[in-house]
Amino acid sequence: MAVASLISGVTACNSGTSGGPEPTTTTSTTSTEAEPLTGFLEPTSGTEGKVTYQADLPQVRGGEPAVRDKFNADMKAALDKYLQPTEDNRSVTVAPGALVDEVKSEVTHVGTGSVSGVLILNISVEQAAHPFNEVATTVIDARTADPINIATLFTDETVGLTALVDAIKTEMAADERLANQPPPDATPEALSRWVADDDGLEIYIPVAHVLGDYYEIGVEWDALAHVLAPGIRETLST
């Protein structure tokens, strides 16, 4: 991480004899270099009623305050959603989660166009059969500080979401671990857990508990090139 630096200097020349030149002082101007936007995981823990939690919360520091604050607030809100009491007020333990292939919480992309992150939690509810994973994602436009939703990626929402699901089906067919797992529906709700990077989209689809409850599927940009809205690839990959 680049750290903001403060540089100042004062140079003085004084005559050592009478009648010499008048003393002069030269002061350099002070400059501050803005800290660039960088991602990190913030360990956070506590208790909310009967919910005890620990999490590795994706956060960013530096950069434009509006972008930083929006991303950090949205990720915190995603965590808070899972700290609410159950309807019957059972004890709940929230811990850092991991999907297949050790996919964990992270800030997945920090760029001039966008910032994205994924929060993965493992939740145990008193008297439940087993703990389960939950996934939440945030994607923010780094120019406007506005959230970017999956439906806005495409020139035509229906056509775009259908093309995305078709690409997901292709990736699922090539992964034997996903045999007999149903593909997601072509709706914004079913495809709402996603992030972007240089290579394309990462979609987190629901799967059987034995596979981790959610599974990360990568879809390359080229598979969606014909349905993407103008400029969206550049926004999400830079």
Image (cartoon, helix red, strand yellow):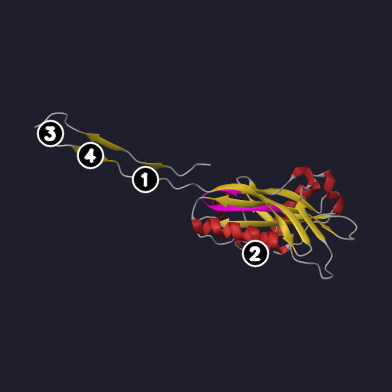
Taking the image as shown, residue 210 lies to the left or right of residue 135, namely right
Could you tell me how far apart the alpha carbons at marks 1 and 3 are, in whole angstroms? 31 Å
Q: Which element is circle 4 on?
A: strand
Residue 217 appears in the rendering = yes
Residue furthest to the top in view is: 17
Q: Are marks 3 and 4 in contact (CB under 8 Å)?
A: no
- Nearer to me, 115 or 161: 115
Give the labeled residue for mark 3: 21
**In the rendered structure, which amino acid carries the disc numbered 1?**
Ser
Give the labeled residue for mark 4: 25
Q: Which element is circle 1 on?
A: strand
Crowding near pointer 2: few (<14 within 10 Å), some, many (20+)?
Answer: some
Residues rendered magenta in the picture: 109-119
Could you tell me how far apart the alpha carbons at marks 4 and 1 are, in whole angstroms? 19 Å
Could you tell me how far apart the alpha carbons at marks 1 and 2 are, in whole angstroms? 47 Å
Q: Which element is circle 2 on?
A: helix
**In the rendered structure, which amino acid carries the disc numbered 4?**
Thr
Q: Which residue is located at x 58 percent, y 52 percent?
A: 115
**In the rendered structure, which amino acid carries the disc numbered 3?**
Pro
Give the labeled residue for mark 2: 157
Could you tell me how far apart the alpha carbons at marks 2 and 3 are, in whole angstroms? 77 Å
Splitting the image into 4 quarters, where does residue 124 fall?
bottom right
Give the labeled residue for mark 1: 31
Q: Which residue is located at x 56 percent, y 55 percent?
A: 232
**In the rendered structure, which amino acid carries the disc numbered 2?**
Glu
